[in-house]
Every structure is written in structure tokens, then in C-alpha cells.
């Protein structure tokens, strides 16, 4: 017990002395700290893109809602449903009734080109044709400005995300769809889901504009309860008149987010890893400089009876302190600069833009600081070993 107390006392004394001399090396220390902060800021900011995109996609799902597509389709763009098939779907068990009939929304999905506000470049914006029942099936949709479109007229309502990201979607503006001009009569929110990236209009009008006849691409079904999904799926897949793929809406959007999430996460980690190599060299340089400047001090302590392990601990503690300060600084920069920042990216399943907000979550902040800690450990290890191996006699001759 006495030896342990003596060792801890030595560690505390050497570490205190090391930190007291830190201001004498403030230039090198600041360079290492800023380098690590840059790595953490880039890592957290990049991963917040993937996190925000996934959050938007998952917010679109509801376990008591089912998505019906043509069998073999991975997205609405690849699906096709005839009007007669949607009527059969509406008669399936587990679907509640409303004043508009079954809570089943047959929907048409196309993409139109509109310029982005930020760059002016054209991008694919989802245009969804729906019937009045859609507002009961999509129960998170709320008008924030204006009114709903009138069936039979060239009118549209626009999600808040699309209105923010693309030009020409302000209330009262007109956009060209096909050969006609369509008026924006309302702006809506959808609980942070992907519908906020879309433009909605009357399905019948959109079918005529794109010569789709009486056809749709998907059917969104509201269930009496999440447990009713299995009976609905069994009934629709067993019907010989239909060739359908039935899935929970939550599963559909989870699958839709996978490609973009993995791509952004992979690229972000790669970039941060390459930057981390530079940060490690910066930390190595800083700590080697610290050890070199403290050679006489370390030799004197060793001559007075201090062990080599407290010296190692003091060098590692200094390296970790710089890394933690850099990690906290980088995490703070990423949070205040990027959390909630709105952008849009391509959803490769639907080949259309999805507007979303960056999400700098507590888990990402912890991950960034942990990443900085690893850099600090690696950057301080070799200099700490060198400090412990300095020959006492040789170092004392430099006094």
C-alpha cells in the first residue's frame, strides 16, 4: 500500500510539473490541439449528415402503416399499380374506413427539375399525386401556410423542406409541370419526414399531365393496429389477381436510407482517418519537443529517486489533455456550426432529392472526443517511452 501511495505521489508531482511548463511550449501545444480539433470537427460534421438523413427517413415511417408496391420493386420509381388493383387493396382486411372510404392512399410519384436556392443547379424534386384520403393516411401532414389544392385544378402544395431548398416554390408562385403552369397554394410540414421534401397535387390531374392513365405506383395503407399488418400481407399476397410486395412503412424507409447512410459514413470516416494521421504526427512532434525541452528536468527527477513509469504517465497525461481539449473544441465547432443546418441530397433509391437537417447527436459528440483520445494516446506513447529511457548520467551532463 505504501509503495502504491508513493508511486501515485510521484505521478502527481511529475504530472503537475509537466503541466506547469505547458505554457512555455504553447505554440507547439496549440498546433497539436487545433489539428486534433479539425479532425474531430470534420468527422462529427460529416457523420451528422448521415445521421440527419437517416433521422428524416425514419421519421417518415409509422408501424401502423403499410407500403404496397409491385412485386420485385425496391422503390416507388420502379413500381406500377393499376387503378383496379388499388381498389382490391382497399378491400383487404385490417384497413379502417373514413368518409372517403378505406384509409388507403393510391399515389403517383414523378420527379421534376427545379433549381436549388444555394447553387442554382437543377435537381430532381419529388412530385406526388394523391387523392383527398391521403391527408388522413399521412396523418402527420399539417398545413403551415395557405390551403390544400383543389381536386381537378393545376394546384400544388409544397413541403417546408422543398420550399426552403428550391426556387420557385414560394406561396403563390407558379411552376411548370409538363406543358402547364401549376400554382403553389399551400406549404405543409410532415413531422420531419421525407414528405417535407415533396410537392403534392391531385392524382387525376398528374395522371393526365404525364399520360399515365388510371395508374399509380404505390398504395399507402393505414392499419387498424400494427398487429393487423400480417393479415393484410397474407390477404394481398394470396390473392391471385395481384402480384404485390407488402411491407411496413418503417421497414421501407429504413431500407431507403441504407445506401446514402453507408456512403456518407464510409467517406466521412475515411477522410477523418487520413486527417488523423496528420494529427498524430502533430501530436508526436509536440510531445517529442516537450520531452526534449524537459530532458534535464526529467533526469534530475530520476536522479532524486523518481521512477520511469511516473515520467511515462506524465507525458501521456499531457498528450491526452491536449487531445481532449482539441476534441472538445472540434465537437463544439461541429455542433454550433452544423446542428440543424438544412440541406438536400440525392436518395439513390428514388433518384430524387431529400431535404433534411444535419443532426449532431450526443453519441456523435462522444464519438468525436473518443477519436481525439485515441489520437492523443498514439501521439504520446512513443515520446513517453523515450522520456523513460533517457540515460540519467548523459542528461545530467547537459546541466
Image (spheres, helix red, strand yellow):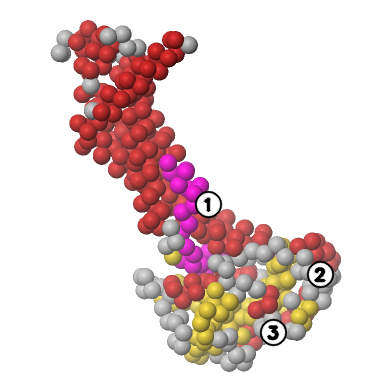
Disc assigned to residue 286: none
Q: Is residue 204 left or right of residue 377?
A: right
Q: Residue 249's x, y, as percent? A: 67, 64
* Residue at 26% across, 16% down: 298
Can residue 213 be seen in the rendering of this structure? yes
Q: Secondary structure at mark 2?
A: loop
Secondary structure of residue under mark 3: loop
Direction from residue 219 to residue 363 in the image, left or right: left
Q: Earlier in the sequence, mark 2 or mark 3?
A: 2
Q: Nearer the viewer, mark 2 or mark 3?
A: 2
Q: Which residue bears the numbered disc 3?
A: 214
| SS of the residue under disc 1 | helix
Residue 310 is one of the magenta-drawn residues: no
Question: Which residue sits at x=34%, y=41%?
Answer: 326
Q: Which residue lies under the disc numbered 1?
A: 262
Q: Is residue 356 magenta?
A: yes
| Mark 1 or 3: the one toward you | 1
In the figure, is residue 339 to the left or right of 10?
right
* Residue 332 x/y as whole percent: 38, 50
* Residue 241 higher or lower than 278, as above or below: below
Asked if the residue under mark 3 is in contact with the one under mark 1, i.e. CB atoms within 8 Å, the reply is: no
Q: Earlier in the sequence, mark 1 or mark 2?
A: 2
The magenta span reads 343-369
Structural distance between the alpha carbons of marks 2 and 3:
25 Å
Assess disc 3: are there few (<14), some (14-19) or many (≥20) residues with their C-alpha within 10 Å of its C-alpha: few
Q: Nearer the viewer, residue 138 or 26?
A: 26
Marks 1 and 2 close (CB-CB < 8 Å): no
Q: Which residue is mark 2?
A: 94
Alpha carbon distance from label 1 to label 2 = 35 Å
Amino acid at each position: 500500500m505504501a509503495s502504491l501511495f508513493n508511486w501515485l505521489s510521484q505521478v502527481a508531482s511529475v504530472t503537475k510539473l509537466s503541466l506547469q511548463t505547458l505554457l512555455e511550449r504553447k505554440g507547439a501545444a496549440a498546433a497539436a490541439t487545433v489539428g486534433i480539433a479539425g479532425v474531430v470537427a470534420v468527422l462529427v460534421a460529416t457523420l451528422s449528415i448521415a445521421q440527419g438523413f437517416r433521422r428524416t427517413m425514419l421519421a417518415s415511417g409509422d408501424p401502423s402503416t403499410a407500403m404496397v408496391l409491385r412485386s420485385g420493386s425496391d422503390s416507388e420509381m420502379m413500381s406500377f399499380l393499376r387503378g383496379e388493383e388499388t381498389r382490391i387493396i382497399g378491400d383487404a382486411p385490417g384497413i379502417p374506413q373514413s368518409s372517403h372510404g378505406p384509409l388507403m392512399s393510391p399515389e403517383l410519384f414523378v420527379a421534376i427539375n427545379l433549381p436549388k436556392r444555394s447553387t442554382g443547379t437543377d435537381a430532381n424534386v419529388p412530385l406526388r399525386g394523391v387523392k383527398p384520403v391521403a391527408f388522413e393516411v399521412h396523418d402527420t401532414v399539417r398545413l403551415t401556410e395557405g390551403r390544400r389544392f383543389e381536386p381537378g385544378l393545376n394546384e400544388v402544395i409544397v413541403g417546408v423542406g422543398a420550399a426552403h431548398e428550391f426556387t420557385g416554390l414560394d406561396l403563390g408562385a407558379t411552376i411548370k409541370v409538363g406543358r402547364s403552369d401549376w400554382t403553389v397554394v399551400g406549404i405543409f410540414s410532415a413531422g420531419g419526414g421525407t414528405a417535407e421534401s415533396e410537392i403534392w397535387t391531385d392524382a387525376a390531374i398528374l395522371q393526365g399531365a404525364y399520360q399515365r392513365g388510371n395508374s399509380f405506383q404505390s398504395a399507402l395503407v393505414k392499419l387498424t393496429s400494427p398487429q393487423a399488418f400480417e393479415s393484410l400481407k397474407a390477404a394481398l399476397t394470396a390473392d391471385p389477381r395481384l402480384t404485390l410486395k407488402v411491407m411496413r412503412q418503417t421497414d421501407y424507409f429504413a431500407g431507403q436510407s441504407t445506401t446514402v447512410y453507408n456512403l456518407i459514413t464510409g467517406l466521412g470516416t475515411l477522410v477523418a482517418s487520413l486527417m488523423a494521421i496528420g494529427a498524430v504526427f502533430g501530436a508526436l512532434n509536440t510531445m517529442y519537443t516537450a520531452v526534449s525541452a524537459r530532458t534535464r528536468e526529467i533526469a534530475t527527477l530520476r536522479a532524486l529517486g523518481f521512477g520511469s513509469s511516473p515520467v511515462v504517465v506524465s507525458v501521456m497525461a499531457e498528450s491526452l489533455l491536449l487531445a481532449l481539449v482539441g476534441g472538445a473544441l472540434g465537437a463544439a465547432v461541429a455542433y454550433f456550426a452544423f446542428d440543424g443546418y438544412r440541406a438536400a441530397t440525392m436518395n439513390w433509391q428514388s433518384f430524387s432529392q431529400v431535404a433534411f437537417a444535419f443532426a449532431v447527436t450526443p453519441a456523435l459528440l462522444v464519438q468525436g472526443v473518443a477519436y481525439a483520445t485515441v489520437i492523443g494516446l498514439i501521439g504520446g506513447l512513443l515520446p513517453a517511452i523515450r522520456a523513460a529511457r533517457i540515460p540519467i548520467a548523459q542528461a545530467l551532463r547537459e546541466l
